[in-house]
Image (cartoon, grey):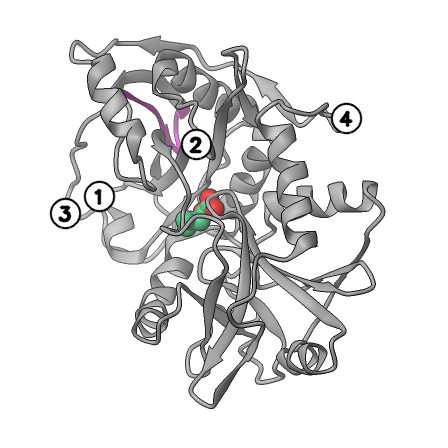
């Protein structure tokens, strides 16, 4: 069944002057566009009432399931303005599919992929003037879904809501592509075996907040989690995946069923293979990383995600000491891959994979 969307345009849209002020320094997730998309669901009716309407506060019942048991999932994807003014989404089908996988794990209803993509497309279309064109800038879309049944019993909600909001963004880290220091969390894990680590659900991010505070207190920008099994295997960062680079041109990224299946990471690895790099997707330990830095075989590392794009890492810090490449410039391979992916996203290079979808 195809969902029909209705549109109620905002009577209070941002002026060109307001937008110019925002685009001067959008930061990340601080400003929101004029509209939002909502689709409701009940177990009886399925998905209904798909609507584009003015952005604004929504009514929350104090007994909504999400407030008590965290039944929530989300996505992140971006719209890019190309030099000819056209606007493109990057692989929205991948985010639609991952939201469905997260929904299955969190006992939420699956949003049909075509409704997900249409919701994103319509929001970008109506708020097109919010897509910035400055260097490194894009419009970040945040689709999300939550249980909104008014009921305190612990079971899957019988009603849910899917929404999409959008925010013009620059670099996620305040210093742009400057290499970041990472705090190794030795007392907290992100997810346990059989848990929700592979789902993009708020709880995984909530559990990263305390270790992230620790990271900030230790002069780091992100936290790195190890497996909860005590085997020293690397999982992911607080809000992004991790890739190590060997001097022989091999990229290594942790394989684990408790981390997020990153769209940016998968795309980068596919792109890297087409550029002649070898890719290893396998368990990798913090000891392998430390020893690889010491013997010179591991030469670079970077964080990757929709928000982070590709951010070089130059130091891993823990209570017991640190290792890495302090004070180094961004790695050559890191920057080469970053450039290649960004060139496709901003339309400066051919898109041989068919990843970009015009709005
Ligand atoms: C993204 O990269 O889109 C994310 O979801 C990370 C975010 C939590 C900032």
Taken as a whole, is the magenta stretch helix, strand or loop?
strand
Q: Quadrant of residue 148?
A: top left
Q: Which mark is residue 113?
A: none
Q: Do the residues under discs 3 and 1 have CB atoms within 8 angstroms? A: no
Counting residues from the start of the chain, the first of labels 4 and 1 encountered is 1
Ligand 1 within 8 Å, label 1 CB:
no
Q: Do the residues under discs 4 and 3 have CB atoms within 8 angstroms? A: no
Determine which residue is flagged by label 1: 150
Task: Give the extent of the magenta segment.
Answer: 34-47
Give the CA distance from mark 4 to mark 2.
23 Å
Q: Magenta stretch: residue 154 in it?
A: no
In the shown orientation, is residue 17 left or right of residue 271? left
Determine which residue is flagged by label 2: 137
Determine which residue is flagged by label 4: 352
Residue 267 can be seen in this image? yes
Which tag is nearer the camera, tag 4 or tag 3?
4
Which tag is nearer the camera, tag 4 or tag 1?
4
Give the CA distance from mark 4 to mark 1.
48 Å
Counting residues from the start of the chain, the first of labels 4 and 2 encountered is 2
Expressed as whole percent of the image width and height from the top left, the position of residue 346 reads 57, 26
Expressed as whole percent of the image width and height from the top left, the position of residue 149 reads 27, 41
Local crowd size for mark 1, using a 10 Å CA cut-off: few (<14), some (14–19), many (≥20): some
Counting residues from the start of the chain, the first of labels 4 and 3 encountered is 3
Counting residues from the start of the chain, the first of labels 3 and 2 encountered is 3
Local crowd size for mark 3, using a 10 Å CA cut-off: few (<14), some (14–19), many (≥20): few
Q: Reply above or below: 266 against 240.
A: above
Q: Do the residues under discs 4 and 1 have CB atoms within 8 angstroms? A: no
Q: Which mark is residue 62?
A: 3
Give the CA distance from mark 3 to mark 2.
37 Å
Residue drawn at x 53%, y 78% is 228
Counting residues from the start of the chain, the first of labels 1 and 2 encountered is 2
């Amino acid at each position: 069944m195809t969902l029909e969307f209705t549109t109620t345009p905002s009577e209070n849209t941002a002026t060109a002057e307001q937008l110019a002020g925002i685009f001067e320094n959008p930061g990340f997730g601080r400003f929101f566009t004029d509209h939002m998309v909502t689709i409701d669901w009940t177990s009886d009716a399925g998905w209904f009432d798909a609507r584009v309407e003015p952005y604004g506060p929504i009514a929350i019942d104090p007994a909504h399931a999400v407030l008590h048991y965290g039944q929530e999932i989300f996505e992140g994807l971006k719209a890019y303005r190309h030099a000819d003014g056209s606007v493109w989404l990057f692989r929205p089908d991948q985010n639609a599919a991952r939201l469905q996988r997260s929904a299955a794990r969190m006992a939420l209803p699956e949003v049909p992929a075509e409704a997900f993509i249409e919701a994103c497309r319509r929001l970008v279309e109506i708020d097109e003037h919010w897509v910035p064109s400055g260097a490194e800038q894009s419009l970040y879309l945040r689709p999300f879904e939550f249980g909104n049944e008014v009921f305190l019993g612990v079971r899957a909600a019988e009603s849910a809501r899917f929404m999409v909001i959008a925010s013009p963004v620059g670099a996620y880290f305040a210093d742009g592509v400057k290499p970041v220091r990472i705090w190794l969390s030795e007392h907290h894990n992100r997810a346990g075996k059989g848990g929700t680590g592979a789902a993009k659900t708020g709880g995984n991010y909530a559990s990263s907040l305390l270790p992230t505070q620790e990271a900030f207190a230790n002069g780091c920008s992100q936290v790195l989690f190890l497996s909860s099994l005590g085997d020293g295997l690397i999982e992911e960062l607080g809000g992004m995946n991790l890739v190590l680079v060997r001097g022989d041109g091999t990229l290594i990224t942790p394989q684990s069923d408790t981390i997020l299946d990153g769209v940016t990471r998968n795309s980068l690895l596919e792109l890297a293979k087409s550029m002649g790099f070898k890719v290893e997707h396998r368990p990798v330990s913090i000891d392998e990383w430390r020893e690889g830095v010491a013997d010179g075989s591991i030469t670079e590392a970077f964080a990757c995600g929709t928000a982070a794009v590709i951010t070089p890492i130059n130091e891993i810090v823990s209570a017991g000491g640190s290792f890495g490449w302090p004070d180094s410039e961004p790695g050559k391979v890191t920057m080469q891959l970053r450039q290649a992916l960004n060139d496709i996203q901003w339309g400066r290079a051919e898109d041989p994979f068919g990843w970009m979808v015009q709005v």
